[in-house]
Amino acid sequence: MINISESAQNHFRKLIEREALPGLGVRLAAVHPGTARADVRLEFAEPADLQGDEWAVDCEGFTLWLDAASVSYLDGAEIDYETRTTGGQLQIRAPKIKGQAPADSASLVERVHWIVENEINPQLAAHRGNVAVQEVTADGVVVLRFGGGCHGCGMADVTLKQGIEKTLLEKVPGVTAVRDATDHDTGAAPYIPRDAA
């Protein structure tokens, strides 16, 4: 399930011994799992800190606790500690943490949401923007709402047609068009004001 190298176990054991707290272990959890923002949270945990549904991985001298809701996302994770001349580097690789793309047999809605959250929104985040799927109609029209820096942005039409619609038409069979349902006149902090575009 999780592979924790001997060097990582030694590293954790040394840190835990310094704390000298009975039952102290390490807890690992996925943060924002299944999304492009997914990451891991690693922290010390005393028995009183535990929820009671964690999965225990027994290591020599301590226990690694896995957050129950994170188990499927952390399956196959590798934890390693690499010693360097300037100190050390802890590395955690969790290949399933961002989730898995839905199968071609998944609903159109699931496939659209996956592409929006894992490909489109990470690109829009560079301009402090995002989109949310408001609706996917029976005839394949995806209706979006722009947010953040994209709400009220003078380039929203270009982003919609040349970026988002192009991506969804290419990558999600069944999508026929993409429409914008955003009232751009109410955008509070557009990346490029509409009068400047």
Image (cartoon, rainbow, N blue to C red):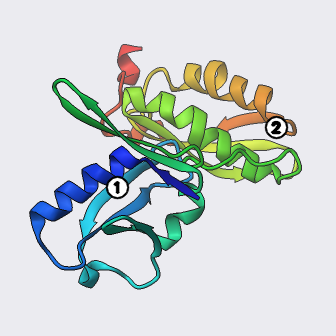
Figure quadrant of residue 75 = bottom right
- Split into 4 quadrants, where in the image is the C terminus? top left
Secondary structure at badge 2 equals: loop
Residue 104: percent from left, percent from top: 86, 44
Residue 140: percent from left, percent from top: 83, 43
At x 27% / y 55%, what residue is drawn? 12
User: 119 or 88: nearer the eye?
Assistant: 88
Q: Say how many tags the image has.
A: 2
> In the image, which is nearer the foreground, mark 1 or mark 2?
1
Figure quadrant of residue 147 = top left
User: 126 or 80: nearer the eye?
Assistant: 80
Q: Earlier in the sequence, mark 1 or mark 2?
A: 1
Would you place residue 185 above or below residue 134 in this image? Answer: above
User: 170 or 46: nearer the eye?
Assistant: 46
At x 51% / y 42%, what residue is drawn? 36
Q: Which residue is mark 1?
A: 41
- Split into 4 quadrants, where in the image is the N terminus? bottom right
At x 71% / y 35%, what residue is drawn? 178
Label 2 Cα neighbours within 10 Å, binned few <14 / some 14-19 / many ≥20: many
The disc placed on residue 67 is none
Q: Amino acid at mark 2?
A: Val
Q: From this viewpoint, is residue 181 visible?
A: no
Farthest residue in the top direction?
A: 197
Q: Amino acid at mark 1?
A: Arg
Secondary structure at badge 1 equals: strand
User: 195 or 48: nearer the eye?
Assistant: 48
Q: Which residue is mark 2?
A: 175
Residue 156: percent from left, percent from top: 51, 26
Label 1 Cα neighbours within 10 Å, binned few <14 / some 14-19 / many ≥20: few
